[in-house]
Image: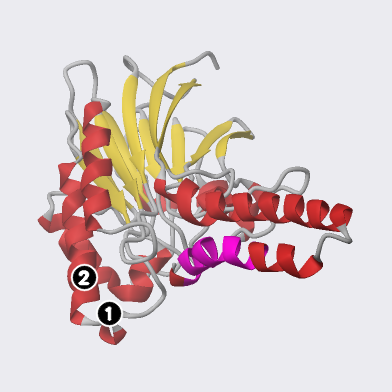
């Protein structure tokens, strides 16, 4: 981030210096160079300093033949990456409050609450305290039937058990190859969570996660990686994933040059219908590797899930 701000501040000075060096004998070169610089400078400022700080509330309606009962409004939040550039605990507080104002029926948190790649033992006390505050701030997102979470790879690289404990402390059950039944007067439903591929306890198993779900009862599956989607059966009304950040950079004509896994490359962002199953991948809130987002803005998602024709 320091380099991004330095570039933003020093860029115009460098442009002025180049303008003066070229001299008046090369007016076309000066104007062409200035136009190119203005374009690149503007794109850089937008991608490194502006777009990662905005928040899009994406509203999606999904009709699923495997759903039962009245429509359900699902608030989706993922990839907060607290401690990485652009996201601190104070921003999570604001985002959680924004989610609450959307009045979802249930909120699902789809992993990677930790920013960076270092283990907890290699972090400073201030860094660990900020991460803990960021996880605690997720409790500010309120819904009728509460919050449910899965862990992501960054959480396990940091300390998965610690992040899990912090989520439970924030009254957010963590589902690892496990399903939770949610009773509502309009008809019960289930939320099942898959283990993360980086988990030190288990690999993602839809079979284990859905073992307790009676046949015919509606169920939603959470997985941080979209790579686990192929093992989800058709009886699941909707699978919700994250991990991809929508590529973080989505270039015109080129697309997303970098995605973090084969599944994220195949299903990077939005809704996918595959073999009678439905997957929704959120772009999440934070950043990883580089503090940049371009045509892939931070988001929370409100999914309205309802019964569709089979």
Q: Residue at x 21, y 47 (%)?
A: 93
Place of residue 56 in the rendered image (x, y in percent of width and height, measured from the top left): 42, 35
Residues at discs 2 and 1 in contact (Cβ within 8 Å): yes
Name the residue tied to disc 1.
Answer: 120
Residue drawn at point x = 23 percent, y = 57 percent = 89
User: What is the crowding at mark 1: few (fewer than 14 residues within 10 Å), some, or many (at least 20)?
Assistant: some
In the picture as drawn, the residue positioned furthest to the front comes out as: 24
| SS label for mark 2 | helix
Residue 256 in view: no
Whether residue 1 sits left or right of residue 227 in the image: it is left
Q: Residue furthest bottom?
A: 122
* Quarter of the picture holding the C terminus: top right
Percent x, y of residue 38:
67, 51
Q: Is residue 77 magenta?
A: no
**Quadrant assignment, res 81:** bottom left
Relative to 158, say whether 38 is above or below.
above
Q: Residue at x 88, y 60 (%)?
A: 26
Range of magenta residues: 3-15
- Among numbered discs 2 and 1, the one appearing first in the sequence: 1
**Mark 2 crowd level (few <14, some 14–19, many ≥20, 10 Å Cα):** some
Tell which tag, 2 or 1, sits nearer the viewer: 1
Q: Is residue 283 above or below residue 11?
A: above
**Residue positioned 66% across, 49% down in the render:** 266
Is 86 in front, or is 69?
86
Query: Is the N terminus in the top left, top right, bottom left or bottom right quadrant?
Result: bottom left
- Residue 66 in the image: state x and y as whole percent: 45, 24
Q: Residue under label 2, please give it.
A: 162
Query: Residue 41 occupies which quadrant of the picture?
Result: bottom right
Residue 296 pos. (x, y %): 55, 45
Magenta: main secondary structure: helix
């Amino acid at each position: 981030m320091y380099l991004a701000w330095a570039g933003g501040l020093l860029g115009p000075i460098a442009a002025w210096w180049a303008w003066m060096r070229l001299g008046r004998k090369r007016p076309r070169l000066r104007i062409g160079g200035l136009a190119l610089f203005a374009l690149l400078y503007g794109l850089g400022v937008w991608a490194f300093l502006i777009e990662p700080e905005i928040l899009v509330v994406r509203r999606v309606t999904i009709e699923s033949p495997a759903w039962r009962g009245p429509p359900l409004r699902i608030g989706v939040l993922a990839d907060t990456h607290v401690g990485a550039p652009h996201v601190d605990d104070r921003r999570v507080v604001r985002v959680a409050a924004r989610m609450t104002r959307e009045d979802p029926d249930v909120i699902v948190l789809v992993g990677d609450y930790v920013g960076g790649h270092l283990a907890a033992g290699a972090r400073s006390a201030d860094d660990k305290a900020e991460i803990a505050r960021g996880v605690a701030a997720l409790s500010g997102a309120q819904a009728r039937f509460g919050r449910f979470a899965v862990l992501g790879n960054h959480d396990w690289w940091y300390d998965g058990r610690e992040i899990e404990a912090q989520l439970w402390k924030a009254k957010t059950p963590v589902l690892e190859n496990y399903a939770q039944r949610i009773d509502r007067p309009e008809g019960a439903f289930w939320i099942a969570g898959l283990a993360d591929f980086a988990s030190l306890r288990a690999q993602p198993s839809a079979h284990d996660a859905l073992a307790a779900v009676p046949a015919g009862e509606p169920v939603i599956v959470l997985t941080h990686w979209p790579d686990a989607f192929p093992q989800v059966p058709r009886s699941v009304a909707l699978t919700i994933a994250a991990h991809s950040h929508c590529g973080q950079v989505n270039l015109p004509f080129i697309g997303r040059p970098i995605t973090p896994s084969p599944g994220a490359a195949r299903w990077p962002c939005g809704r996918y219908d595959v073999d009678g199953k439905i997957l929704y991948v959120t772009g999440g809130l934070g950043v990883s590797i580089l503090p940049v987002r371009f045509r892939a803005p931070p988001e929370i998602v409100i999914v309205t899930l309802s019964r569709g024709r089979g």
